[in-house]
Amino acid sequence: MAKSTKRDKPVNKPKQKRSIETRNKILEVGSMLMLKEGYHNVTTDDIAKAAGLSTGIVYHYFKDKKDILLIALDQHANALYEGITEKFATVTEGNFEDFFNTLFDFLLDYHKQAWVIHEELEGLYHSDPEIAATTNKYWEKTYASIAEIYVQKSAKPEHALEKTKMAIDIIEDFCHACMNPIVDHLDQDFMRQETISIIKSLLT
């Protein structure tokens, strides 16, 4: 018989207000610790201590720290998704300049705040199927939503989903490049405007 692991065991799903608050506190504290210190540098004991709880209480509500990460990632991804789609929805027909400048600021700020955990998630994406599935679900949802809005606002809606994916991936690559110290001496404003020009050419 296969040996049971913590991830195989069911966890408590709170119904009482106090239990829900405790679970939410663990989730919030765990998310902030991982955001600040990184996933690999935080233990379940660290999360329990920061939340002012015992480690046993943490395991009462979550299988392990990965369980906390997956739930936090899902919540954070939804918030990021809503932020992107809300900004795209304000674009006037055929005019993407203001949107992309706003989106660049939005995503650059996100990468600066979450760079440690972001880099770790990049690696975990390739090694952990559960994290990959959660990440894929978010991006598929984002691409589809923005593509739908793009069809409404563009005179050339052909291959909307493909164009949307390419555009967002280009912006993601730009953000990653800006986080690398080797570009500190380069003209990032020029790089940004040229990147926007490429995306506008793609979408219009």
Image (tube, grey):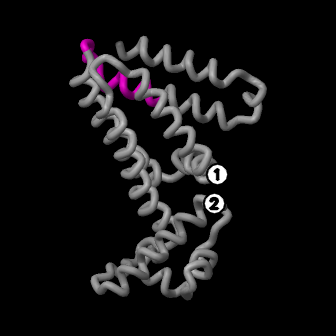
Residue 130: in sight, yes or no? no
Q: Residue type at mark 1?
A: Val
Q: How crowded is mark 2: few (under 14 residues within 10 Å), some or many (20 or more)?
A: some
* Mark before the other along the chain sequence, 2 or 1: 2
- Disc 1 designates what residue? 116
Q: Main secondary structure of the magenta part?
A: helix
Residue 152 position, x and y percent, is 21, 24
Residue 76 lies in the magenta stretch? no
Between 109 and 181, the residue placed more toward the observer is 109
Q: In this view, does 119 lie above or below 32?
A: above
Q: Is mark 1 on a helix, strand or loop?
A: helix
Q: Mark 2 points at which residue?
A: 36
Question: Within the image, what quadrant is residue 100 found in?
Answer: top left
Under tag 2, what secondary structure?
helix
Image quarter of residue 149: top left
Residue shown at 48%/28% (left/top)? 101
Amino acid on which disc 2 is placed: Lys
Q: State the image coordinates of residue 143 (x, y, percent, origin top left).
A: 34, 34
In the image shown, does 149 or 73 lie closer to the viewer? 149
Within-10-Å neighbours for mark 1: few <14, some 14–19, many 20+: some
Residues in magenta, as a range: 155-169
Whether residues under marks 2 and 1 lie with C-beta atoms below 8 angstroms apart, the answer is yes
